[in-house]
Amino acid sequence: MPRGLNNKVALITGAAQGIGRGIALRLAQEGVHLALVDLSVDKLKKVQTEVEALGVKATIFNADISQLEQITQAIQHTEQQLGGFDIMINNAGIAQVQAISDVSPAEFRKITDINVGGVLWGIQAAAKKFIERQQKGKIINAASIAGHDGFALLGVYSATKFAVRALTQAAAKEYASHGITVNAYCPGIVGTDMWVEIDKRFSEITGAPMGETYKKYVEGIALGRAQTPEDVAALVAFLASEDSDYITGQSILTDGGIVYR
C-alpha cells in the first residue's frame, strides 16, 4: 500500500470515465478525498457515488480544462469543499486519428488546447495554490507511449504528449525549490472508450475491420494482454504517495511492454 495517502485531497480532471474513473476509485481505496472534474455532470455524479461508497469525501465540478480560469475555479472549489489540496492529476485529454496531411487548423487547435493547454494550466494553477498554502504538492500529468514514440495517424496526438513530457520536465525544475514534484504517467493500449474511438477512426481511414487495429496493438504487448484503468491507477497512486517523494520530472511508461526506454 502506498504510504501517506490517507486523508489527502486530490483533484482529478477527466474523472467521469475510463482512466480518470479508475484513478478515482484507486485513490479512494487509499483514503484520498476527491474533487472530480469533467464536462459530463451526470457521469461525474455516478463516479462520486462510487468513490463515496468507499468511505471518502467527494465533490464534483464541471469545467473545461482548456480554460485557465475554470481550472483555477475547480481548485478553489476543491479547497473550499474538502478543506485542503495536496495532489493535482491532469488526466483529461482527447485523441485524434488523422493523417498529418489532413489535419485542419481547427482540429490542431482543439487537441493542443486540451492536451497541452489543459496540462499547462493545471500545472500553473496547482503550483500557485500549493505555494499560496505554503505546502509541498504533487502534480501528475497524463502523457502516453505516444509521448515517447510518434505513431502513424496519431501524429498531432503524439506531438501533444511529447509536449506534456517537456512541460513535466520543465515544471519539475521550476517548482522543485517549493517542494512540488511533477511527474507523468504514460499508458499504452487501455481498453477504454477512447480506444473504441481510435479503432473506429483507423477503420474509416485504413479500411481495416472494426477491432482489427486494437487487436494488432494488443498482440504487440509483451505481457500478452490489454491494459486496464486499474493498471494505470496503480502507478498514479504511487506517484501521489510519499513513496515517490524523491522522483520528479519523469514520464514513466506503464504499457505492459510496448515502448522501451
Image: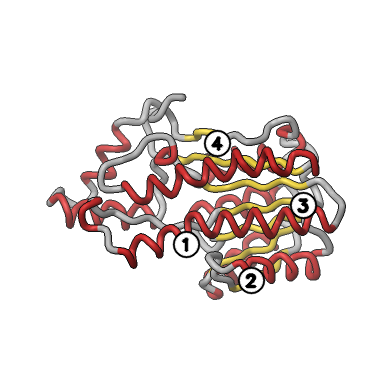
Q: Gap between marks 3 and 2, in whole Å?
A: 20 Å
Q: Look at discs 4 and 1 and give the one toward the viewer.
A: 1
Colouring mode (rainbow / by chain / secondary structure / one colour): secondary structure
Query: Which residue occupies the foreground of this view, 246 or 102?
Result: 102
Disc nearer the start of the sequence (3/2): 2
The local secondary structure at tag 2 comes to: helix
Taking the image as shown, residue 201 lies to the left or right of residue 17, namely: left
Say above or below: 181 vs 24.
above
Taking the image as shown, residue 223 lies to the left or right of residue 43, namely: left
Q: Residue drawn 31% across and 30% down?
A: 220
Q: Which mark is residue 251?
A: 4
Q: Which residue is mark 2?
A: 69
Disc 4 packing (10 Å; few <14; some 14–19; many ≥20): many
Residue 145 appears in view = yes
Q: Which residue is mark 1?
A: 113
Disc nearer the start of the sequence (2/1): 2
Which image quarter: residue 204?
bottom left
Q: Which residue is mark 3?
A: 86
The local secondary structure at tag 1 comes to: helix
Residue 91 x, y percent position in the rendering = 55, 53
**Residue type, label 2:** Glu
Q: Look at discs 2 and 4 and give the one toward the viewer.
A: 2
